[in-house]
Image: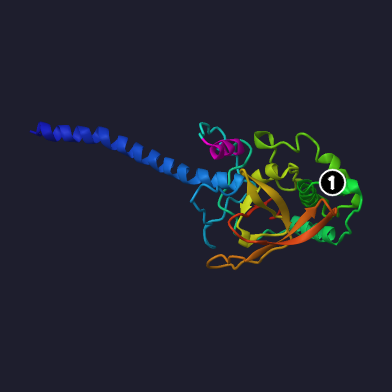
Amino acid sequence: MVSPRILAAAFAAIIVLPIMLVVLVFAHVDSAVAADYPYQCDSALGPDPSSTLTYSAPTLGDPEPPASDTPTANPYAPVTGAVDARGRACETAMRAAPLQAWPKGTTATGVTVDCAHTIIVALMNRPGSNTASSRTTVEPAAVTAAVIRQASSATTARDCTLLTPADISNIAAEQNDSSARATGPSAKCPVAAAASVVVLPTTIAAQSFCGQRVDPAAVSSGDLVFWDYQNNAPQRVALAVGATNPPTTGQKTQLPSLQVAVWDPASGQMTELTLPNDSGIRVKRFLGSTS
C-alpha cells in the first residue's frame, strides 16, 4: 500500500511543477522584454544621459535582422505608465517607431544606393544659392527626405534622376505640409516594399524614429546619420556619403569617423562633414537590397 505521505508528495508535484514552468516561462519573457525595451527606446530617441546601459551589436557572423529591410509593427506601442520624461518620450516614440532588430552589420547594395550616392555627390558639387529665401526656407530634413525619395524611385524608373534647383525650391513648400512635419505617434514612417518609393517625414525628430538601425561600421550611401541628441531627439541629420566596406569575418571594425553630407541652409548647398564615430551617433537605413 502506497504511503499517504508519498501520495501527497506526488499530488503536490503534479500541481506545483506546471505552475513553476509557467512562472519560469513568463520570467524569461519579462527578462527579454526588460532587456529589449531600453534598446528600442535608444534606437528611437538616442542615448539616455541618465542610463549606464550600453548596447553592443553582435559580432559579424551573428544572425542578421529579418530578411525584410523594413522592421515589423511595434508590439510596445500599447505600453503606458511611465513616471519620468524619458519613459514618457519612449512611450510616444513606440507608437510611431517600427520594431528594431539588431543593427544591420552589412553594407547596402543596389540601384537605389548607387543613385543616392550619385545625387549626394551632385548636390555637393552644385553651387550654393545666394538668395535670402533659399538660405532660410529649405531645412536639412526636407532635403534628406527628397534625396531618399528620389533615390528610391530609381527602382521602378530604372534611371537615377538628379535633384534640380527647381526641385530644391519646391522642397520648401513641401516641408510645410502638416502631415509630413508631424512628430510622435502621428508621424508616418514609410512601410517599404519592393519597387516602392520611400516617403519620409520632413522633420529630423520624426525621421529618426523610422528605418532600420545600422551599425556605423556598415554605413552605406544614403543611410541617414543622426547626432547632437538633446531632450530625447536629434538636432542634426546627414546622409552617409559612401560605404565603409567592413570586414566579412571576426569583430566589426570601429571606424574612427564617418563621412556625411549635410545640407547647409545658410549657403543653400550640401557640404561634406567628418563626424567622430562615438556613442552619440545613430544610423538608419531606408535604401538597398534591390538590383
Vertical arrangement, residue 100 with respect to residue 221, above or below = above
What residue range appears in magenta? 84-93
Residue 281: in magenta span: no
- The image quadrant of residue 244 is bottom right
Point 27% across, 37% down: residue = 17
Point 70% across, 38% down: residue = 188
Q: Nearer the viewer, residue 98 or 94?
A: 94
User: Residue tagged by mark 1?
Assistant: 136
Q: Residue 219, position in %: x, y? A: 66, 59
Farthest residue toward the left? 1
Q: Residue 286, position in %: x, y? A: 69, 50
Asked if residue 54 lies left or right of residue 92, the reply is left
Q: Residue 174, position in %: x, y? A: 83, 40
Q: Residues within 10 Å of mark 1 (few under 14, many from 20)?
A: some
Vertical arrangement, residue 209 with respect to residue 77, above or below = below
Q: Residue 224, position in %: x, y? A: 70, 53
Which corner quadrant holds the N terminus? top left
- The image quadrant of residue 193 is top right
Residue 102 seen in the figure: yes
Q: Secondary structure at mark 1?
A: helix
